[in-house]
Every structure is written in C-alpha cells, then in structure tokens.
Amino acid sequence: MATKDNTSNTKEYPDKFGRKHDSQEKVDAANAQIDAQCKYLKTKYNGVEEDVALETINILNPDLCIDIEGLTEDEFEAALFEAQVTRSLENKKKEDSAKDKAGLSEDGLRMWIALRLAHQLEWRGDYCWPKEGDIEQKAHVLREILPKLDMEKPLRFSEEDFPVVRKRLGKSLNKINSYLKPIVYEDEEVEPQAGSLKNKKRSNAPEPNAYQELLRRTTRARYAEGKSLNWKMVLDSLKHHLEKGDSLDTTGGKIRLTIAEGTDDKEVIKRKESTFEKDLSFYRQNLLKLPLPSKRG
C-alpha cells in the first residue's frame, strides 16, 4: 500500500522576513536575531525607521548567517539606500492604491484601473497625469480622455462612479493648465464700458475669457450630438449656448459678445470671422481645453 504523503499538512511558521519554519521555537529564535540586528542598525544610524532597518537587514543578511557588525560602511550605506528606495516604492504603491479606491465601487475601480493603464496615467501627489511626455503632452492626453469619457459615460461608469473619475481627471488637467501660459489670440479685444476702470476686477466673472468658454461649450455640444463642426454652422449655433444675460452679434463679418450686466465691468469681446475659423480649428482638436464652466445665476 502506498504511503500517504503528509508533507502538505506540515504546519509552517513565518518569521519577520517571511521565511518559513517548522516550529514556533525556530521562528522566535530567528525573530530575536532579526530584532537584535535591527536594534544595532538603528543605534548605528540614528533616525533609521523600523521598516527601513528591517529591509536593510533582509538585504545584508537574509539567511541570518553572518555578523553584520563586521560589515564595512560602504556595505551598510549601499544596503540602506536600497532599502529606502524599496520602502519608498512600496509606500507609494499603497498610497496610490488608496487613491484609486477612494469613492469608487468595485466595478468603478476596475474600470478606473483599466482607463489609467490604457493611458499610462500615474499619481503625482493628488493629481493623476500621464507618465511620459512634457507638460504640454501630458495636458494633451488628458484633453483627449475627457471628451471621450463624457461620451462613453453610460458604458464605462455608473452614475455614482462617473463624477468621482471626472473630478479626478478634471482636477489633474486644471493643475497642468495652471502651469501653462493662457491662450492669447492676436486680435482679441476687450472693451471696458464707460465709467468702469480698465483693469478693475469683475466681482462675479464666470470665466477668464467668456468668448473661449462660449466656443468650447458650443463645439462640445455639437460634437456630443454628432453635428457638423463646419465653422459657419458653429457660428450660427453660438447664440444657443450663451450664458444668461449675455448677447451676441455676428453681423458684418465680426463677432461681438457682450457680457451680461450685474458685474463690476461690463465687457465687450470682439473677434473677426477669419480668426474665428482659426479658433475653431483648435477646439475641434481639444474640446476641453478649459475647465468645465459653472453656470451663472
């Protein structure tokens, strides 16, 4: 009769390095040796954290078969550096995992991770940016993700998860935009009305440039509805996307946007039709160059 193999039933006891032992006594002895060497290291290098000291011992003496007090300074410093890097990466991984999970359901988390990996996004503090490229290229990637995300929302995220993901990416894009110079068009004119100071700050101005926001809203809406982005059709649609109280005149080959009353400065923004075509070309490629606007009451 074959002898039954009971090896798989043998109980194993892990020590602080994760090594397995066949008895608790051996684990206690190994842990005592590890603790003694960690204490020596923390005394030698005042301020070394417990987890770094433990990782350093694991690097220098994984089998606990040498006396670390006989090692050279170069060996200690090299191991300390490697341990600090290892722990730093592990801590960042834990922090990033917590940021990924925050506010999302299990399904939402899976979809978020898939999106993040597909676009090679990584956490940088509180912001999630592309790993590769300069600041302009990182911004470009996020500007392409956001409109697609808005279009595919029903297929990707639930009503509860979508605002969490949208806010993450929008916040990250806003941060990148803050590092970039604002878009300034050559013939843009802003005329303060009589009686107002030229540089006086408006008390409730909704955007840094109302014309840019109007063009962004209009192109995004037409894109979402699958309508043509021909410049004449977009120009004709501007009047349907004005903020409350604003007015628009598109006669005479010029665009004249008048900001609503109720602000400290009433502004008039003028554009030529020829320049409007150039502006539109930019928004065709980047529908969300600016943050989502907030409606004025």
Image (cartoon, rainbow, N blue to C red):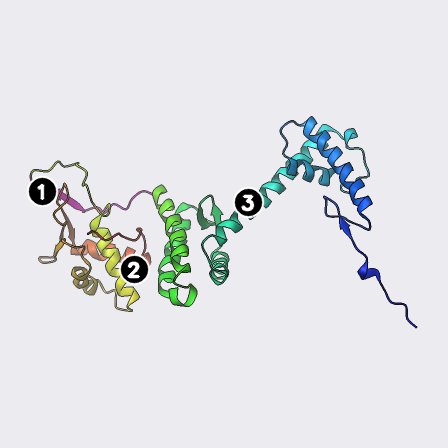
Q: Is residue 131 visible?
A: no
Judge depth for marks 1 and 3 and give the one in front: 3
Against 2, residue 245 (above or below) is above
Q: Residue furthest front?
A: 24
Residues drawn in magenta: 180-194
**Residue kind at label 2, given as amino acid type:** Arg
Residue at the image position 28 percent from the left and 57 percent from the top:
283
Which quadrant would residue 267 be assigned to in this image? top left
Against 108, residue 198 (above or below) is above
Within 10 Å of disc 1 (Cα), the crowding (few <14, some 14-19, many 20+) is: few
Judge depth for marks 3 and 2 and give the one in front: 3
Query: What residue does disc 2 label?
Result: 284
The location of residue 152, given as percent across then percent down, is: 38, 65
**Residue kind at label 1, given as amino acid type:** Gln
The dot on residue 193 is: 1
**Residue kind at label 3, given as amino acid type:** Lys
